Image: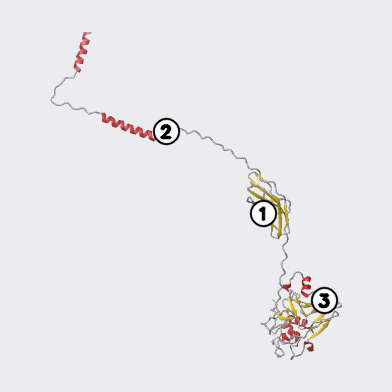
């Protein structure tokens, strides 16, 4: 026991440092605090960066509470609009129907128009803005009847329909008759006022406009009832180039000798003059018991024409009348009758006997209707031909009466 204690004491004695006195100063110990601070700062920076960049993971944002849905209270729908009344449909032309009605509602958003086109089924044709009171329907056909209904509408639906309204679309008026145009005249090689076919009737030269050399064109001489192939004043009647025909009804006239006349009635109120070339001249005597003025009589017989469609006429013998709208018929009042002479082309493409037609009218004598002295040479008369360019016969010159005087007017159209 004592021995052990002694060893322990000896060992402790050896551990004690010996105090050695040295002449050199003892070294100064450096503080470790700055290093610790730097390490702490670095660790803090790293930790702070880690925390910053992972903040959403480390510190997730608090979830906002879910919004509470607010359901608005819808206003009640408006009431149905009031039905339109007094619907009326009218059509005054062949192109449209006008529909009108009374708007009785203050809350409509528009109107709907339905139409029945004749099959008994109403179908929508258009929609109109609010406050409308009329609709012009142009999608119609002339001659058909259309029925209409009008509805006022809003978001709640449609009103009751208006009363049905119907209208019949009239047919368009007939087109005015076209003014007739004359076909071209037959060939007139020497431009003397009569065609080459007429030259053969009167014995004249187709290459000489004044065959007898008397200073008058052959056509003018035929018109004035003179012989174009003989020296003046030889008349056509004296030359045997024409013959006189008459009828019991009381007319007398001259026609070319080579032509024939056929009385279709015993009294001659219907007759036909045949040119032997396809063209004919139809003669008739019409009744005018009231002795109406010739224009009034004509318009009553042909209501499709107007007074503007006819021309005044005066023959060489002084008979006055009118030229009809066809420009190929002449009407001369004769007491309670009307004498009519019509040039019928019968499909011929040319007017070959215009001057001969005028010659027949100038030779006309009507029983009981006095003639006047023929006008002096050179005066202008209706249907008087004149020399023109080759192959053309001038149109007749109508005259218009002004009081008792007779003056020439412009040529026929």
Foreground residue among 320 and 413 = 320
**Does any portion of residue 284 appear in the rendered image?**
no
Q: Is disc 2 in contact with disc 3, using a CB cutoff of under 8 Å? A: no
Q: Is disc 1 in contact with disc 2, using a CB cutoff of under 8 Å? A: no
Q: Position of residue 80 (x, y in %)?
A: 66, 44
Tag shown at residue 57: 2
Q: Position of residue 24 (x, y in %)?
A: 14, 26
Q: Earlier in the sequence, mark 2 or mark 3?
A: 2
Residue that label 3 marks:
337
Mark 3 Cα within 10 Å, few/some/many (few <14, many 20+)?
some
Foreground residue among 341 and 170 = 170
Helix, strand or loop at mark 3: strand
Instruction: State left or right for residue 402 relative to residue 23.
Output: right
Residue 108, compared with residue 235, is above or below; it is above
- Mark 1 → mark 2, Cα distance in angstroms: 73 Å
Instruction: State left or right for residue 294 relative to residue 100.
Output: right
Q: Position of residue 197 (x, y in %)?
A: 73, 82
Closest to the camera, between mark 1 and mark 3, is 1
Residue that label 1 marks:
134
Q: Earlier in the sequence, mark 1 or mark 3?
A: 1
């Amino acid at each position: 026991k004592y021995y052990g204690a002694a060893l322990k004491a000896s060992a402790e004695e050896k551990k004690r440092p010996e105090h050695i006195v040295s002449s050199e100063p003892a070294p100064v110990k450096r503080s470790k605090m700055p290093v610790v601070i730097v390490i702490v700062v670095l660790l803090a920076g790293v930790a702070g960066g880690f925390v910053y960049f992972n903040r959403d993971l480390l510190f997730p944002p608090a979830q906002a509470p879910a919004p509470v849905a607010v359901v608005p209270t819808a206003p009640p729908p408006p009431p149905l609009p009031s039905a339109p009344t007094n619907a009326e449909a009218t059509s005054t032309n062949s192109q449209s129907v006008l529909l009108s009605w009374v708007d009785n509602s203050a809350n409509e958003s528009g109107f709907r128009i339905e139409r029945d086109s004749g099959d008994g089924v109403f179908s929508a044709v258009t929609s109109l803005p609010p406050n409308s009171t009329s609709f012009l329907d142009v999608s119609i056909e002339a001659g058909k009847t259309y029925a209409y209904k009008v509805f006022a509408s809003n978001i709640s639906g449609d009103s009751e329909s208006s009363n049905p309204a119907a209208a019949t679309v009239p047919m368009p008026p007939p087109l005015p008759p076209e003014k007739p145009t004359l076909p071209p005249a037959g060939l007139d090689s020497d431009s003397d006022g009569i065609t080459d076919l007429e030259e053969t009737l009167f014995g004249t030269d187709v290459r000489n406009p004044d065959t007898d050399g008397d200073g008058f064109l052959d056509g003018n001489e035929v018109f004035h009832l003179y012989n174009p192939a003989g020296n003046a004043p030889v008349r056509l009647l004296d030359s045997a180039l024409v013959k006189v025909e008459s009828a019991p009804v009381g007319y007398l006239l001259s026609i070319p000798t080579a032509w024939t006349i056929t009385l279709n009635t015993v009294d001659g109120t219907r007759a036909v003059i045949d040119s032997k070339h396809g063209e004919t001249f139809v003669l008739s005597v019409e009744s005018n018991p009231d002795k109406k003025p010739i224009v009034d009589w004509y318009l009553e017989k042909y209501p499709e024409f107007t007074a503007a469609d006819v021309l005044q006429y005066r023959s060489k013998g002084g008979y006055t009348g009118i030229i009809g709208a066809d420009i190929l018929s002449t009407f001369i009042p004769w007491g309670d009758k009307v004498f009519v002479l019509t040039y019928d082309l019968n499909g011929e493409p040319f007017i070959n006997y215009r001057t001969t037609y005028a010659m027949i009218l100038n030779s006309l004598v009507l029983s009981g209707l006095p003639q006047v002295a023929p006008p002096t040479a050179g005066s202008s008369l209706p249907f008087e031909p004149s020399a023109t360019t080759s192959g053309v016969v001038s149109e007749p010159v109508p005259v218009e009466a002004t009081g008792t005087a007779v003056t020439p007017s412009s040529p026929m159209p």
